[in-house]
Image: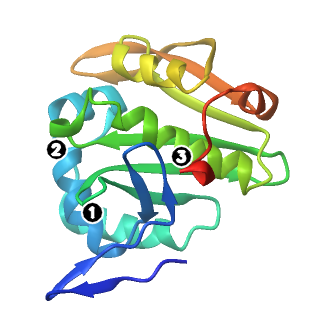
Amino acid sequence: MTKDVEDEGERRRVPVLRGRGVALTPLEADDAELLHEWRADPVATHEIGIWPRPLSWLRERVERDIDDNDRDDFLVLLPDGTPIGHVALIEQDIADGTAELYLLLDAAHRERGHATAALDALIDLAFGDLPLHRLQAVTHTTNTPALAVLAASGFVHEGVRRSWCQHRGRRHDAAVLSLLRPEWEALSRPRVWDH
């Protein structure tokens, strides 16, 4: 659990995890406006398969998700506290030890290594603090940046869901990738608790 700190009249978020150049703090209902702005980016809309929704819908969704015990949502913060993205462990099944990852970065902060750092922090939480054994990620087979981030974090390509979704009048295949606990244990990178 985090607490917020008042700093000269502005609310400052306190990180619960620190990665390489980023930190994670739990998502709050007031973050819906930020998410709405990031979700309006045409690249994110296409690659993640986000359906345009009004802010009121997203606010209700965020409030519902915060109370959902099968997911953990976090804002990605720069060292100065600037929010730049959203990561989540979704569809957690503690009995089977599985979950799926979700990542969305502000367009202005992509291609700077923040995505890999945020994903690594979330993975360390999943395997270091939760009893998970398998993490999964799904993205378009043409989403080269996401596939590169997942590979950099140790994910292995498992297969393709053919004709998985429709966007912009075309059917798209989805790549399915996974990372298992023993694969994470074999990675030589520092863990979030080392930062």
Q: Position of residue 70 (x, y in %)?
A: 64, 60
Which residue carries the number 1 mark? 81
**Nearer to us in this view, 53 or 70:** 70
Residue type at tag 1 = Gly
| Residue depicted at 24% across the width and 60% down the height | 80
At 21% across and 47% down in the image, what residue appears?
38
Quarter of the view holding residue 185: top right
Q: Which residue is mark 3?
A: 121
Q: Secondary structure at mark 2?
A: loop
- Disc 3 from disc 2: Cα separation: 25 Å
* Left or right, 67 with reference to 191: left
Separation of residues labelled 1 and 2 (CA atoms): 22 Å
Residue with the mark numbered 2: 40
Q: Secondary structure at mark 3?
A: helix
Instruction: Answer whether residue 13 is visible to the viewer in this image.
Output: yes
- On the image, the x and y values in percent for residue 192 come to 57, 49
- 46 relative position to 127: left or right: left
Amino acid under disc 2: Ala
Residue 90 visible, this angle:
no
